[in-house]
Image (cartoon, rainbow, N blue to C red):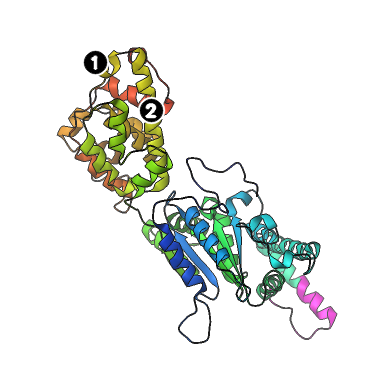
């Protein structure tokens, strides 16, 4: 299959790929989720759990949701059998954000072979069954109907009322005694018909949905509504990889014009909405094995980042215990965050080592022995915090901060002006920073290192600091 240009780097996966070797022990979690999707319940009726609906795979940005979805999809395909066939469709929602309606885009994706990865082919798309053209024609008509219905939901009250009036007149003139079928029932029946063409009677379709939390709030909420109210059929289960915090905020943002309550109450509403929407959810939590995974993924050949750093500079360095302490905070246990932090740190350190070959005073006179620690800290801040917060840190008198509340206080403000709540993992990172007692850098030194973190290009210390 082809991949769009929105693929990430640094080993990040794309939904539908073969799962990478990860080292975070997510295989056990994938087995548990697949068990919930396929094993029979204890009712004795042979019904799978859950028989239908939405299953959530929750986690922060960069926690490994796509990787876990790939593990789930691969396992479902491998255990598919003639008696109980499994079809696995990958729907990458963000690819369709530019379209007017995600629901109609989703229906069209169901009949595209490229959305069935891991060397599987939808049986209904084989030439021995109804022709591909016939199935696609049905699906596209269904998608067009959904799209038109979506547009009608946005019309004004008067226009909507006029439409209802016209429908009643048409009904009276037709001589029918029974009212027309409700729209929701029409959509659900069309979805069931499409499933009957795609999935064998004894089989099940699992739709893995990724990157929905990157979409706009209206698209997020609309697809939630369609999954729950219209597309929920007996032969189909949806597994959504989702940052539930972002989704809750999107829900609140979508409904904010209709509700009036305090900020925290509104966020509670978003979480209650999700709780009602999902049959069951699994959450990816921070993992202490992330450092080991990152070193292996980046092929750095060391047991720890501190060990790799010593090898690179050829000596011990100040601040090594503090580096290890920061690496134990949950803020750096998010795989993508640490991948980017370590990659930036490595490129920056290699740039400084290259510069030291031509400027022998860089390591001996211009920078203290603890500079690798400060370079690592700046690399972490670069990927954890907004640029203006990092700039405030770089411009602060760090020596004075160490004497007062600690250097982390620059990022978080005063007690009555906290930027990061207690549930934000960055708050623990800030607390750990407040305990740092490694000799602080001078203004020219820290600005030089921060510039290196951003440019990742060798530059002379005196040329940079002399230029201001």
- Magenta stretch holds residue 175: yes
Which numbered tag is attached to residue 317?
Answer: none
Residue 146 x %, y %: 69, 63
* Residue 273 appears in the figure: no
Crowding near the residue tagged with mark 2, few <14, some 14–19, many ≥20 C-alpha atoms within 10 Å:
many
Q: Residue furthest front?
A: 301
Query: Is 295 or 257 nearer to us in this picture?
Result: 295
Above-or-below relation of 42 to 285: below
Tell me the element at label 2: helix
Q: Position of residue 30 (x, y in %)?
A: 45, 62
Mark yes or no: residue 175 visible. yes
Label 1: state its secondary structure: helix
Q: Residue at coordinates 30% horizontally, 13% vertically from top-left?
A: 360
Q: Which span of residues is magenta-colored?
A: 166-183
In the displayed structure image, the side of residue 28 where residue 147 appears, left or right: right
Q: Which mark is residue 365?
A: 1
* Residue name at image x 27 percent, y 42 percent: 326
Q: Residue at x 45, y 52 (%)?
A: 64
- Position of residue 151 relative to residue 130, above or below, is above
């Amino acid at each position: 299959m082809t991949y769009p240009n929105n693929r990430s780097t640094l080993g990040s996966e794309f939904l539908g790929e073969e799962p990478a070797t990860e080292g975070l022990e997510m295989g056990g979690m994938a087995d548990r989720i697949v068990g919930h999707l396929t094993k029979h319940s204890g009712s004795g009726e042979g019904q799978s759990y859950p028989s239908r609906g939405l299953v959530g795979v929750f986690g922060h940005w960069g926690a490994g949701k796509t990787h876990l979805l790939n593990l789930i999809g691969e396992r479902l395909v491998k255990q598919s059998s003639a008696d109980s066939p499994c079809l696995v469709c990958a729907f990458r929602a963000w690819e369709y954000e530019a379209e007017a309606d995600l629901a109609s885009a989703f229906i069209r994706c169901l009949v595209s072979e490229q959305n069935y990865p891991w060397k599987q082919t939808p049986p209904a798309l084989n030439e021995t069954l109804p022709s591909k053209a016939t199935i696609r024609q049905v699906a596209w008509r269904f998608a067009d109907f959904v799209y038109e219905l979506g547009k009608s939901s946005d019309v004004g009250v008067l226009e909507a009322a006029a439409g209802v009036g016209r429908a009643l007149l048409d009904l009276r003139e037709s001589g029918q005694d029974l009212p027309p079928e409700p729209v929701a029932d029409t959509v659900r029946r069309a979805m069931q018909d499409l499933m009957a063409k795609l999935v064998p009677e004894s089989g099940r379709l699992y739709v893995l949905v990724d990157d929905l939390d990157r979409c706009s709030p209206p698209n997020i909420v609309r697809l939630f509504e369609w999954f729950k109210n219209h597309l929920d059929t007996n032969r189909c289960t949806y597994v959504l990889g989702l940052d539930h915090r972002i989704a809750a905020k999107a829900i609140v943002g979508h409904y904010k014009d209709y509700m009036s309550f305090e900020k925290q109450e509104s966020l509670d509403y978003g979480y209650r909405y999700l709780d009602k929407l999902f049959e069951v959810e699994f959450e990816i939590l921070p993992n202490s094995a992330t450092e080991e995974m990152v070193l292996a993924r980046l092929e750095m050949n060391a047991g720890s980042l501190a060990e790799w750093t010593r090898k690179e500079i050829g000596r011990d360095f100040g601040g090594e215990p503090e580096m290890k302490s920061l690496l134990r905070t949950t803020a750096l246990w998010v795989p993508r965050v640490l991948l980017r932090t370590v990659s930036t740190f490595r490129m920056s350190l290699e740039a400084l080592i290259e510069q030291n070959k031509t400027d022998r005073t860089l390591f001996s006179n211009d920078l203290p022995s603890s500079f690798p620690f400060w370079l690592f800290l700046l690399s972490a801040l670069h990927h954890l915090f907004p640029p203006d917060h990092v700039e405030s840190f770089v411009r602060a008198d760090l020596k004075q901060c160490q004497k007062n509340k600690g250097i982390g206080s620059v990022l978080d403000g005063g007690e009555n002006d906290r930027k990061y709540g207690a549930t934000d993992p960055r708050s623990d990172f800030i607390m750990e920073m407040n305990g740092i007692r490694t000799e602080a850098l001078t203004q020219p030194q820290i600005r030089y290192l921060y510039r290196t973190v951003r440019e990742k290009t060798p530059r002379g210390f005196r040329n940079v600091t002399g230029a201001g």
